[in-house]
Image: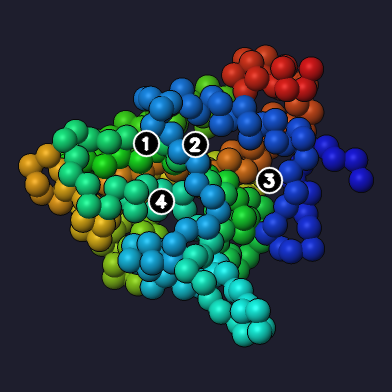
């Protein structure tokens, strides 16, 4: 096998190996995306597991039992046991848990990166079960959160356009609230709580490469976070999916990274990475 720039499938559907050239794109995206974040000191990386209690309290386990990956361990005697951790389904959950009980004197903005897992039923192009996500998260008041989400997402959209990726902005239903419920789904769409940036990641395959979510006070309530006035904090997040972005760039500019436009190579640091 000679790894090129494309994802390498494995015997597990939706699970891929990353060749060095693919990884150079992901790495370049990661460094370049840091410019979208206000303060590099406010950045975190999460391991791929999180306390089960956080995911249960946040409502994910109830809304998406079929997507959640759990961990199975065994006692020394061999008895099966589900320990206190699960696989992380989205990067931002660890931030709300980190701020549990906090009172925010000013809005807090953080960036968090993680390998996420969702037990997706399908394996079309761009649908991975294990994938990496970078999120920007804001904890603040109602007045801060929605406008922040919209400005951050607009900045991401402009940034992607500068890399040659034109995206469509579309209202979606929000997994944070459970998109299985049709009525709830319609209400969320009406309130525009989730906005996605869509682009082609392969011939005829359009996927969300980024999304912006406004959770209202859902996580503030669950984790007891308050704003400067003592009211329940609101939260918002903007997520980038690294593999989908890399796939979209490969689809747009071709499999030979050396023939990509100079400014894209420069922004992603591909010259240094690949020579
Ligand atoms: P969300 O929490 O909005 O569903 O996901 C955030 C971002 O993670 C999406 O915009 C997308 O870029 C990425 N993502 C979500 N699901 C998948 C998936 O099944 N495969 C891959 N490769 N990326 C995903
Ligand atoms: Zn998020």
Please identify the quadrant where the C terminus is shown: top right
How much space separates mark 3 and mark 2, taking CA atoms?
15 Å
- Taking the image as shown, residue 84 lies to the left or right of residue 200, namely left
User: Which is nearer the eye, 132 or 81?
Assistant: 81
Mark 2 touches mark 4? (CB < 8 Å): no
Mark 3 touches mark 2? (CB < 8 Å): no
First in residue order: circle 3 vs circle 2: 2
First in residue order: circle 2 vs circle 1: 1
Q: What element carries label 3?
A: loop
Q: Nearer the viewer, mark 2 or mark 1?
A: 1
**Residue denoted by label 3:** 203
Q: In this view, does 72 lie above or below 169?
A: below
Mark 3 burial class by Cα count in 10 Å: few <14, some 14-19, many 20+: few
How much space separates mark 1 and mark 3, taking CA atoms?
35 Å
Q: Is mark 2 on a helix, strand or loop?
A: loop
How much space separates mark 2 and mark 4, taking CA atoms?
28 Å
User: Which is nearer the eye, 257 or 109?
Assistant: 109
Q: Is residue 109 above or below residue 70?
A: above
- Cβ of mark 3 under 8 Å from ligand 1: the answer is no
First in residue order: circle 1 vs circle 3: 1
Task: Tell me what residue is drawn at x 79 percent, y 28 percent.
Answer: 256
């Amino acid at each position: 096998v000679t790894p090129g720039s494309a994802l390498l499938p494995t015997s597990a559907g939706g699970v891929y190996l990353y060749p060095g050239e693919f990884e150079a794109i992901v790495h370049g995206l990661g460094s370049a995306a840091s410019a979208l974040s206000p303060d590099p000191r406010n950045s975190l990386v999460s391991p791929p597991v999180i306390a089960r209690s956080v995911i249960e309290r946040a409502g994910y386990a109830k809304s998406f039992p079929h997507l959640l990956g759990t961990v199975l361990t065994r006692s020394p005697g061999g008895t099966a046991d589900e320990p206190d951790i699960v696989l992380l389904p989205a990067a931002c959950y660890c931030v709300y848990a980190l701020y549990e009980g906090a009172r925010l004197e000013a809005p807090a903005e953080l960036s968090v990166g993680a390998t996420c897992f969702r037990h997706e039923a399908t394996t079309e192009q761009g649908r991975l079960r294990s994938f990496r996500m970078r999120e920007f998260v804001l904890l603040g008041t109602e007045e801060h959160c929605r406008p922040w989400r919209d400005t951050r997402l607009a900045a991401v959209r402009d940034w992607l356009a500068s890399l040659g990726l034109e995206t469509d902005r579309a209202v979606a239903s929000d997994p944070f609230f459970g998109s299985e419920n049709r009525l709830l789904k319609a209400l969320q769409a009406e309130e525009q709580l989730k906005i996605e940036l869509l682009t082609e990641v392969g011939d005829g395959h359009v996927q969300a490469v980024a999304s912006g979510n406004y959770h209202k006070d859902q996580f503030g309530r669950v984790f007891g976070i308050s704003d400067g006035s003592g009211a329940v904090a609101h939260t918002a997040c903007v997520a980038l999916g690294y593999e989908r972005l890399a796939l979209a760039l490969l689809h747009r500019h071709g499999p030979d990274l050396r023939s990509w436009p100079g400014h894209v190579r420069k922004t992603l640091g591909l010259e240094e990475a690949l020579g």
